[in-house]
Amino acid sequence: MERASESLLSGVNPELARRVRNMAAALSARGIEIKVTSGKRSTERQAALYANRANNPLPVARPGTSKHEQGLAVDVVPTGARTSSVWAAIGEEGEREGLRWGGRFSKRDPPHFELLGGGGELVIDDSKVIAQTKEQAGGVQVIAVFCIAALVIRLLRS
Ligand SMILES: [Zn+2]
C-alpha cells in the first residue's frame, strides 16, 4: 500500500497489518483502491476524537474502550467513489480476511475493521474463562456429592 497507509499499518498489530494488506490486494484486483486513514491511537487522541464526536458522522468509542488504542483496529476508505457497492466489496474482502467489520455494527462504521481474538491477548482471556468454567463445574460436582451424601445419611437414619 502507499506510504501513508504503510506508516499507519506499521503501528498496529502485525497480524492485522498483514490482513489489511491482503484485503487491499484483493480489492485492487477488483479495481478498488483503499487507503488507511487511522491505525493505532493514543488515549489522548481517542479522547480528542470523543470530545469532538458531535462533528463526526461515524461513531466514536469512549477513550479507553477503542480497539484503535490497542492497535487492533484500522479505518480504511476507498480512494475513488464511495458508493454502497464499493463499501460492500470492502466489507466482503475484510471479512474474508477474518476481520470484524464496522459496517455490521448497530451504529454503522463502514471504514472500521478490527482483529478478532485481540492478537493473542484474548487467547489468554479464553484460557482464564475455561479455567473458571472448570472451577465452577468442579464446584457443582462438590455440591452434588454433598447432596448425595446428605440423602444417604437420611436414608440410613430412617
Ligand atoms: Zn475505527
Image (cartoon, rainbow, N blue to C red):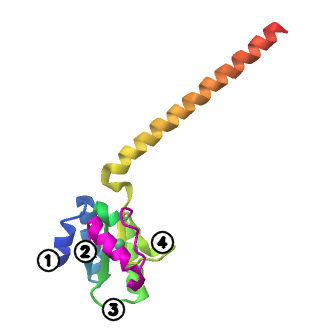
Q: Badge 2 is on which residue?
A: 25
Name the N-terminal-most of marks 4 and 2: 2
The answer to which of 41 and 27 lies nearer the viewer is 41
Task: Estimate the spatial distance between the alpha carbons at disc 1 and disc 4, rounded to whole Å.
Answer: 29 Å
Residue at 66% x, 25% y is: 144
Element under disc 2: helix
Q: Is residue 97 magenta?
A: no
**Quarter of the rendered image showing ligand 1:** bottom left
Q: Badge 4 is on which residue?
A: 105
Name the N-terminal-most of marks 2 and 1: 1
- Residue 103: which quarter of the image? bottom left
Q: Nearer the viewer, mark 2 or mark 1?
A: 1
Residue 81 in the image: state x and y as whole percent: 33, 91
Establish whether ligand 1 lies closer than 8 Å to the Cβ of label 3: no
Element under disc 1: helix
Task: Estimate the spatial distance between the alpha carbons at disc 2 and disc 1, rounded to whole Å.
Answer: 15 Å
Q: Which residues are magenta?
A: 38-65
Residue at 26% x, 70% y is: 39
Does residue 154 appear left or right of residue 87 in this picture?
right
Residue 67 in the image: state x and y as whole percent: 35, 63
Cβ–Cβ under 8 Å for marks 3 and 4: no
Q: Badge 3 is on which residue?
A: 81
The amino acid beneath tag 2 is Ala
Task: Estimate the spatial distance between the alpha carbons at disc 3 and disc 1, rounded to whole Å.
Answer: 21 Å
Q: Nearer the viewer, mark 3 or mark 2?
A: 3
- Residue 76: which quarter of the image? bottom left
